Amino acid sequence: MKRIFNNRWWGKHGVSSGLTLTILLLSAFLILVDCSTKVQKVELDIEKNQHDFILTSFLFPDTIFLYLNSSKDISAELANGHLIEAVGEEIDTLGFSIQNHLTGSPCSYLLIHDCSGSMRPYIDMVLCVMEHFIMNSNPLDEFRIIQLGGKLKAMKNFTNDKNNVIQWLRTSNPPIPNGTPLFDALQLGIDYLGSKQREKILIVFTDGNVASTENYEYLIEWAKDVNVRIFVVGMGSIKPGLLSELAKNTDGIFLADDDRTCSQTAYNLSCWISNFYRISYSPAGKKLDGQTHMVTFSVPNSSINFHGQYRVPKDETIFARARIVHEIDTLSTGYNLPEELSVPVLIPFYDMGNSALYPSAKQKLDNMLQNLLTIPEKYTVTLYIDGYTCDVGSEITNLLLSAERAETVNDYVGSKLTPNITTELNFYGESNPLNENKTASEKALNRRVTIRVFLHQGQNASLNDSSVR
């Protein structure tokens, strides 16, 4: 395995620098919850069908995704839907496909149980909801509990022994309720779930909220990066706040207490988790021209009605260049890279000054390595490992930190590569940000390493560096 180390800092001063791209793919969500039999002897208590939509255009111009959470099974209704996309004065009615994530795949659940003093009136209710939810889940689902008061207390490991989980809940002495480090519990829960390869669900039972001084945007980006969906069951007089935003932005739901019984609440929660749909379609207008696409999806005689929009990139964006380079690669070799390697792989380093890998980053690298090892050895492969920082701190400090991050990633993957795969390290400091670099969450996204995979025919083939930057 050969390694080349380059200083690309000068790229920000006019010399062509590295190709970067972050494609945050929403993974297919897989869960088994049979809402018709979930809680026996409980009548349906959802008075009206409620829906929550998220529109993503990460794979434009190939595919647009519309994600839909519903409080009921609406598979039959969606099939009768109409999808319309308008660009300027051009309006098109488009075909679409639907994927319902009700499958037999097991899930990993992390339940956060708020045991603070204000939750005392609701302790029995929460325990009842949790027990109903756990005992009526997929037999292969696994659970782990975090309790919080003045400090955090957690089960040692995930387990699918439901009786053991219930026993822990009933016998565990909650921490002293002299404070509520909810933000810390959320961080710990996302970290516990991050390395799991199943559908990952985090459920919070609380009457409080995340303090406005906490960097909840950081939690959103972290949860999205490791594909954790967050659901909040609010107790008492809790009002939608940052927890509601956290749930909404991670494809979850904020459920306020509404005087339902514990079995009904558990039933409703399981329905919201299980009724998750992905509607995908190919846009009629595929030009990279920066225009806004208006999207409408509706079902006649139903409450399903969505209006949204997305803006496509312009032709000179790194997005467009990434596709061009991939097409050149495919044409020159006759071999298609695995889909996961056809776009740059983003490895996050959310904390300032940090060059150590998160568990979720290691999992992402392991997935990349598995795909790399499927490439026939007759092809030579170059991994361009590009290190970056945000703009906090001096330029020279950030330059050195970006080099450390690139080295960290190279050290992790280097020993696992086959002889036909080489790496080239580049470090750019704070140059080439992915965004405006103004908010805390934007700065967190820029603290990263990007890995670009390039394929060549034959052992002696080479790639002109200027053709990929």
Image (spheres, helix red, strand yellow):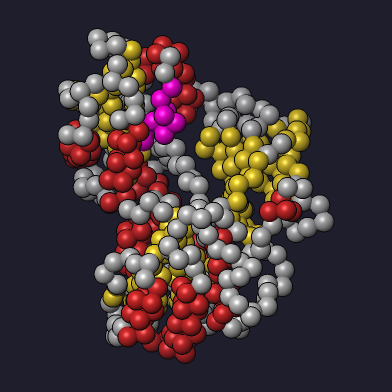
Main secondary structure of the magenta stretch: loop
Q: Is residue 299 magenta?
A: no
Residue nearest the viewer, comparing 392 with 128: 128
> What stretch of residues is rendered in magenta?
336-345
Above or below: residue 259 compared with residue 266:
below
Above or below: residue 150 compared with residue 454:
below
Where does the image place residue 436, in percent across and percent down from the top left?
42, 40
Where does the image place residue 261, in percent across and percent down from the top left?
59, 83
Above or below: residue 341 compared with residue 301:
above
Above or below: residue 53 compared with residue 177:
above
Residue that appears at 51% across and 55% down: 104
Q: Where the C terminus falls, by quadrant?
A: top left
Residue that appears at 47% across and 54% down: 105
Is residue 233 rendered to the left or right of residue 173? Answer: right
Q: Which residue in the rendered view is the most extreme toward the right?
A: 301
Asked if one can make out residue 171 in the rendered structure from this viewpoint, the answer is yes
Asked if one can make out residue 407 in the rendered structure from this viewpoint, the answer is no
